[in-house]
Image: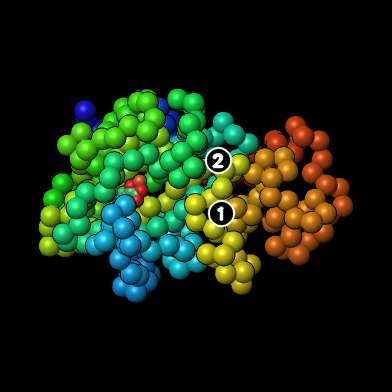
Amino acid sequence: MTLTHLPADTTPDDVAAALARDGVVVVDRLASEAILDRAGRELAPFIEQTAFGPDDFSGRRTRRTGGLIARSPACRDLVRHPLVLGAVKQVIGHSTTFRLHLTQAIAIGPGEPAQPVHRDQWAFDFFPFPKGYEVQCNTLWALTDFTAENGATRVMPGSHRHDDRLAYAESDTIPAEMPRGSVLFYTGSLYHGGGANRSSATRVGINLTYALSWLRQEENQYLSVPHETACELPDDLLRLIGYARGAYALGYVDDLRDPLEALRGERRQDGFGRLEDAQARLREQLPVPSIPPR
Ligand SMILES: O=C(O)CCC(=O)C(=O)O
Ligand SMILES: [Fe+2]
């Protein structure tokens, strides 16, 4: 088992190809020091106030701090990183739209044992999705270096093709070591888990995940982002966090209004239009900016 690392000037195609092959890939040093510093500064007071997890899965020496769209403008940029959105679109763009699934700073403290190995898509009530049908794509941005000693995520490249509900141990996995600013991509079907932190410092990652829009979001964005804050956010970010229909009709408001129209206080009377046109429009609205040439 080896973990593929790609350079920061890689393309969405290469990230998506690695994910199709292995279910996991690291892009090294993608985030600038400036955005990492901003994110660190914005999140620090919230992480400090977060309680440790209540059980072995959440981690009794781990703090999980959410609501990052509301709390951290830097995370609003990370969540829309063009390389990420371009790759995510290829991994789960087989449905009409995808959206943000959760935002979570994961701070694994010294002495934390390894998290049980799992698939993140088990969150969907353990529904047995068909092999190869990806429903979720994750990013975990390294705010500190990730090392085997300090709790780097443990991964099993290729395990996205394994059977469901298998029990693996830490010894079946390898550490996703990466320097600060790198981002670990993995599909919802990859077997993985947080690593044991045998160092004296806390390991911090920012987990931003995306899933098909017809599945329920793990983090409720409508309540995690206060209404007043949502009203100030740009349309593309709002659509990404969930103010868009999940397919032709999912998530509409009262008289067939699109959620974004409702948030903006607009009222159109023409409903959603023809199915094909509506689907094409929803796809076009996906915020997938092109990567400027270097
Ligand atoms: O923090 C990590 O390295 C991964 C955590 C994880 O996999 C989870 O909480 O689902
Ligand atoms: Fe996980």
Q: Dot 1: within a 10 Å radius of its alpha carbon, few (fewer than 14), some, or many (20 or more) residues?
A: many
Q: Is residue 109 left or right of residue 69?
A: left
Name the residue type under label 2.
Leu
Image point (28%, 45%), residue name:
116
Q: Which mark is residue 148?
A: none
Pointer 1 or 2: first along the chain: 2
Image point (44%, 66%), residue name:
72
Residue 246 in view in this figure: yes
Give percent across and percent down for residue 143.
28, 57
Q: Quadrant of residue 48?
A: bottom left
Quadrant (top left, top right, bottom left, bottom right) of the N terminus: top left
Display coloring: rainbow
Q: Residue furthest right?
A: 269
Q: Which element carries disc 2, helix, strand or loop? A: strand
Q: Which is nearer the eye, 168 or 33?
A: 168
Distance (Cα) linking label 1 and label 2: 12 Å
Q: Quadrant of residue 13?
A: top left
Q: Which element carries disc 1, helix, strand or loop? A: helix
Q: Is residue 129 left or right of residue 59?
A: right
Q: Is mark 2 within 8 Å of ligand 2?
A: no
Residue 81 in view in this figure: no
Give percent across and percent down for residue 196.
19, 51
Quadrant (top left, top right, bottom left, bottom right) of the C terminus: top left
Give percent across and percent down for residue 117.
29, 41
Do labels 1 and 2 touch, CB within 8 Å?
no
Residue 132 in the image: above or below residue 146: above
Name the residue type under label 1.
Ile
Q: Dot 2: within a 10 Å radius of its alpha carbon, few (fewer than 14), some, or many (20 or more) residues?
A: many
To which residue does mark 1 refer?
Answer: 241
Q: Is residue 278 left or right of residue 180?
A: right
To which residue does mark 2 refer?
Answer: 212
Image point (57%, 51%), residue name:
240
